Amino acid sequence: MIASLAALPIVLLALGTPVFLVFLAAVAVTFLFVLPTPPLALHQVMFGGLDNYALLAIPFFIFAGELMGTSGIAARLITWVLTLVGRLPGSLGVSTVGASAVIGAISGSSVAAVAALGKTLYPKLESAGYGKERSAGLLASSGAIDIVIPPSIAMILYGLAAEQSIPRLFIAGILPGLLIAALMSIFIVIVAIVLKIPVVGRFDPAVAWRATNDAFAALLMPVFVLGGIYNGWFSPTEAGGFACLYAILVARFVYRTMGWADIVRAAGNSALLSAQILVIVATAGVVTWVLTTQGVPQAIVAWIEALEMSTFSFLLAVNLVLLVIGCFLDPTSAILVFAPLLAPIAISLGIDPIHFGIVMTVNLAIGMFTPPFGLNIFVAQSVTGLPAHSLYRGVLPFVAVQIAALVIITYVPAISLALGRSL
């Protein structure tokens, strides 16, 4: 029976069943055959898991990202970044990474970044000499930076699941996100030199000044959002609401690129995506409740302690496991299920839970563009029209680059913790 229960989620995932239905099926079978429980308990646990004020930040930041993508703000940010790196070899590729990092500081949604950047940059990257596969791989992998750069939906969920400070997680994600962006940019410059990709433009102070003026209102958004959180002006949830209001004002009255009908349409799209995430939150909460009531986290902690596993070995094992899990589960599902199990073990081994949250987030960010089921691969496929096997080849070099960044972040905790300690 136990073996059958363990195999059920794997079989359902392999069949392409939506993740929330996989969770519900596993819990339903457990309630029927292993842990007899009144049906009302399932209802109470599911809705109790959603009764959390901090979860409101998720639809707010998704809406802000949707507004940014549909209003042309993303295009202005891309132009601004490109004017700053115009003289570099591979400047167009570097600007893709830079624009993704800036978008991440606004929306916190990897999927939104890939969709927004793909429509604008994929044709330019291909025509510049990067090739179809490499261009698509760059877009899919750059989007993953967005869940590391704050504000991050993944970090909000980790903070809730592991009972850690969300503002501290946001601060801890800044330097790791910049490190990933830097390594990606260095790799792109090397590729551009080897392939002799021509430089797209040159640095012109006058052009850069005009682009900065054009993007200034958009660039102020992450300053206000993150600055407000770090200075205690508002909570992450309130920051999400502010980001939505600011994006509407900028798009409607500053750039004049959206009408009220466009804003309503963006709200509808955001509601659909938010519902997809929150239904996973509800069902994953039941899975976590079952595991906790059965003493699974305590049993795992006892087992790890019996093995006398070192911190180095534990982090190595966690990285390997999460990299595999990330290939099959989206970050939302993986964090909600595994953070409550792994965070107590990390704490028992003396690992800072904030640092551990960043390690988990980076692992699952890599999983978002790792074959076979990385979500960003499918988003990039819809934007570029390339077959899946071409995208697999395109993303693999960037998987290697981000794994190198993961190793550095994992074993140099100061990268995650130094900024928070200095503030």
Image (spheres, rainbow, N blue to C red):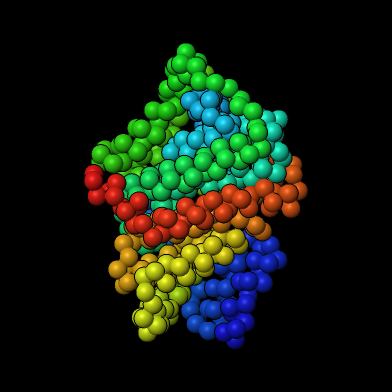
Residue at the outermost bottom position: 1
Kindly identify the residue that appears in the image at 51 percent across and 73 percent down: 39
Q: Is residue 50 visible?
A: no
Residue at 47% x, 13% y: name it: 206
Q: Position of residue 82 (x, y in %)?
A: 53, 27
* Outermost residue toward the top in this view: 206
Work out whether residue 252 or residue 170 is closer to the camera in this orientation and state it.
170
* Vertical position of residue 215 compared to residue 167: above or below: above
Depicted 195 relative to depicted 392: above or below: above
x and y percent of residue 133 in the render?
A: 70, 44
Question: Can you say which quadrant of the picture contains the C terminus?
Answer: top left
**Front residue (pair 36, 74):** 74
Residue lying at 41% horizontally and 48% vertically, measured from the top left:
176
Q: For residue 128, what is the image quadrant?
A: top right
Horizontal side, residue 377 vs residue 317: left or right: right
Front residue of 362 and 206: 206
- The image shows residue 83 at horizontal and vertical percentages of 51, 23
Q: Position of residue 199 (x, y in %)?
A: 60, 27
Q: Is residue 222 visible?
A: yes
Quarter of the image for the N terminus: give it: bottom right
Which residue is the extreme one toward the left? 422
Side of 24 relative to 154 (left or right):
right
Q: Residue at x 50, y 16 (%)?
A: 204
Quick check: 299 above or below 154? below
